[in-house]
Structures are given as structure tokens and as C-alpha cells.
Image (cartoon, helix red, strand yellow):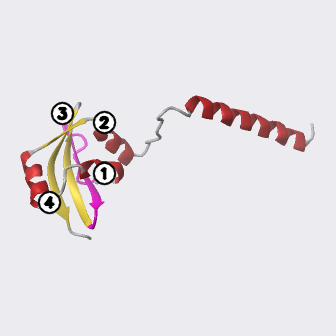
Amino acid sequence: MKLIHRLAYYGLGLFFGIVILIFFLGGKKASCDYSPNARVLKNIKTKKRTFSDSSLLSFQEYDIDTAVVSSILEDGDVNFDKSLTHKDPCNIYFISGRIESRLLELEIENCDSLATIKQMKIKKDE
């Protein structure tokens, strides 16, 4: 079999394989969150969120809506150096994200079914 025929068969099989994958996986909300940062953020996003009194006071003091937590959890960065990832029973993560021109840092206690925002700080640009 000539090389051109092999490439044609390969291309035809690849085409039908992609069409079948698009057909079966097209309506599903599949995601590829493989990095540690993405896995932590996704884990926290799926849980019920509560706010501590000190975090609510910080949000009021800086006149920031608590809805910004959702946007920080979408594209924030987890600081694993400061985070306590092996604390029992709940891990504590420090997540930073930029809202408007301010850099916010959230301290989040991540338990089995609940994520509690413990503190919110406005960080100085470094």
C-alpha cells in the first residue's frame, strides 16, 4: 500500500473519530482541571460558601461586594507556600485575584461540604 493511501485512510479514520467524539461529548460540561491551582479552585467553587464576621467587616470597610469571591475563584491564584494543605480537618488556602485595580487575598477554610471565607485583605502590588 502506498504512503498516500495510508495517509488517506488515517485521515478518514481521524475525521470520523473526531465527529463521533463531538457527537457524544458535545452536550456535556466536561472540564480539564488538572493543575493543582485549578483543582483547588474548582473544589471550593462547588461547595456552599459562608463568610466569617471579620471577612464581612473587611468587605464593608473597603466597599466591595461579596460577589467578587466568585470571580476570584474563577481566575485567581492559590498561594501554596502560605496555604496549610495538610491541616486536619479543614485545609486553609490563600487565594489572590485582581478586582478592578486592587489585588485581593482571601483566606479560605476548605472543609468537606463547606468553604468559609475567613479573611479578606487588600494586598500592596509587589
Q: Please tell me which of labels 4 and 1 falls first in the chain.
A: 4
Secondary structure beneath label 1: helix
Secondary structure beneath label 2: loop
> Where does the image place residue 126, in percent across and percent down from the top left?
26, 71
Q: Please tell me which of labels 3 and 4 falls first in the chain.
A: 4
Mark linked to residue 46: 2
Q: Residue at x 36, y 53 (%)?
A: 75
Q: Which residues are magenta?
A: 81-101
Packing grade of label 4 (10 A; few <14, some 14-19, many >=20) is: few
In the image, what residue type sits under mark 3? Answer: Pro
Using the rendered view, name the quadrant where residue 123 is placed: bottom left
Q: Please tell me which of labels 2 and 3 falls first in the chain.
A: 2
In the image, what residue type sits under mark 1? Answer: Ser
Packing grade of label 3 (10 A; few <14, some 14-19, many >=20) is: few
Q: Which residue is mark 3?
A: 89
Q: Residue at x 22, y 57 (%)?
A: 105
> Where does the image place residue 26, in percent across and percent down from the top left?
56, 34
Mark nearer the viewer, 4 or 1? 4
> Where does the image place residue 35, in percent across and percent down from the top left?
42, 46
Q: Give the alpha-carbon distance from disc 1 to disc 2, as whole Å.
A: 14 Å
Q: Give the alpha-carbon distance from disc 2 to disc 3, as whole Å.
A: 18 Å
Mark nearer the viewer, 1 or 2? 1
Mark nearer the viewer, 1 or 3? 1
- In the rendered image, the vertical position of residue 31 relative to residue 98, given as above or below: above
Q: Which residue is mark 1?
A: 71
Q: Which residue is mark 4?
A: 63
In the image, what residue type sits under mark 4? Answer: Asp
Q: Give the alpha-carbon distance from disc 1 to disc 3, as whole Å.
A: 26 Å
The one of 101 and 14 positioned closer to us in this rendering: 101
